[in-house]
Amino acid sequence: MLFFLLLFQAANFRYVDSSRVNVYASDGENLTQLELSDGDYDDDDADDDEDDEGEEGEPITEMEEDEDYEREEDDDDEDDDEDEDDDDDEHKQTPAEKKQAMDEYLAQIHMMEEKLADSQKAESEAKRKLKQAEKIVELERSLKNLQKAHRAKRKAAPTAKGGSQPRGSQRRGSQRRGSSASRGSPSAKGNQDSGRKGRPRQEGQAPLVANKKGLLTRYLSISDEKAFPYASPKRKKLNKRADGKIRYATPFEHVCGGNSDMKNKSLGLDGPSQYMSFSNAGLFEHETRGNCVQNWDKGQRRVKVSRKDVTAQGAVVFDVSTDALAWKWCYEGAKVVIEGKTYEFHGAKTIKPWPYKCAKSVWQKQKKQSTGSPGKKWWTTKNRKEVGAKCAEWTAFAKEVLILVKPGKKLKIKTDRKPAKKGKECTKSLVDKCIKFNVKTSTPCCCSNPKCGTPCPRAPGA
């Protein structure tokens, strides 16, 4: 401790040499040596002490030095602030410049919003196209399954009465049209080729004629059941057709126009017609009259009527149960006399262009797409023939016979099979159908019931 005290005193001790110092003074020409005593001389520290004294000669303390330093720093800061204020004044924006900058900023935000909206729109469009592609693939798969099932059914179907053909004859789709189906009266004679041009009947093949005395069957809908034992068409009077005329619908329009309850041009539906659809059970008994054979059999009542009874009640029969018989009405058309008045029923050959369902089907197949409708220029002779063939294909699949009753009249019918018990019908879904039918108990086994062992088709009517 004593050592540090001595060291502190030694550090603060000021040593002055008492030896003499030579000092020279100048009078402008000569230097004169002066002698200074110890009291007349001091070192540089003495001068510093004098500078550090105040107004009254008192020495300046360390605290005062710190205050002076801080004061100088404050002065420097004030100078810097003044310089910054000057810079701010130089760069200060006018109201117009501020407005322009704000407009540019808002424009950038608007541009970013537009880019975001475009990206979201593109994303939604991509999702929509993906769903549409998936739907198309699903529809194509369903169509292939339907075609496969139809071919298998045709191959397994037994030979119908009255419609047998010898082995080696060409398939039904290539049979020649051999009769007029206006009132079920046959017109073919012998083996004369009465088919349409380019598709001759094979030698030895019997001509295909309408079964004049054959039986016709039909499965009643809910509205038909209420009117039993009478049946009537959806349209009981003449109505305005697609060409703007008030008249009977043609067989072509009934088939290709869908016979829908309402008119929808985008779907190819031209509204209800004055026809009722029956099946040719006389010519295709096993394919039409058997229980749960037809795809629209849901256990409802099946009715029957003979051609003779139909004509006796003043109705007209249009047999379109095969594509050969249907060609007359689907493509060529003909004139029919009803109650002494002649009506001309146009087929695809001469009918006014309109986007009927079968025309849309042909056009979309040509374009390899699932939407859209043909225009008026598309209705060439070649395309009209394809439309007529599509119409005949649809009617042949259903073994269809059309019955046209007089306006305001009804057709009397009889029960061929009693309907299923109430609540037992196969109506759980659009694709639900009858698999088996117990005639004694009037109970169907539906495809919606797993115990029946047969799954429902992928699409209605399949």
Image (cartoon, grey):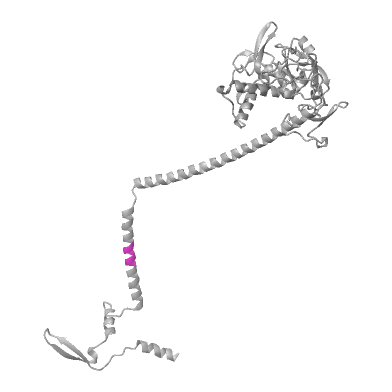
Instruction: Specify the quadrant of the image occupied by residue 226.
Output: top right
User: Mostly what secondary structure, the magenta segment?
Assistant: helix
Instruction: Specify the quadrant of the image occupied by residue 374.
Output: top right
Q: Residue at x 67, y 22 (%)?
A: 391
Residue placed farthest to the front in the image?
Answer: 203
The verdict on residue 146 being magenta is no
Residue placed farthest to the right in the image?
Answer: 440
176 to the left or right of 105: right
133 to the left or right of 285: left
> The magenta stretch spans which residues?
74-80
Viewer-nearest residue: 70 or 232: 232
Q: Which residue is drawn at 39% across and 87% down?
A: 8
Q: In this view, does 88 lie above or below 388?
A: below
Residue 48 visible? The answer is yes
Count of marks overlaid on the render: 0
Q: Is residue 447 above or below residue 116?
A: above
Viewer-nearest residue: 319 or 90: 319
Q: Residue 144 at x, y = what percent?
A: 70, 34
Residue placed farthest to the left in the image?
Answer: 29
Q: Residue 337 at x, y = what percent?
A: 69, 8
Q: Quadrant of the C terminus?
A: top right
Viewer-nearest residue: 61 or 380: 380
Residue 259 visible? The answer is no
Q: Residue 290 at x, y = what percent?
A: 82, 25
The verdict on residue 78 being magenta is yes
Q: In which quarter of the image is the N terminus?
A: bottom left
Q: Residue 457 at x, y = what percent?
A: 74, 33
Q: Which residue is drawn at 63% across and 29% down?
A: 365
Instruction: Specify the quadrant of the image occupied by residue 378.
Output: top right
Residue placed farthest to the top in the image?
Answer: 340
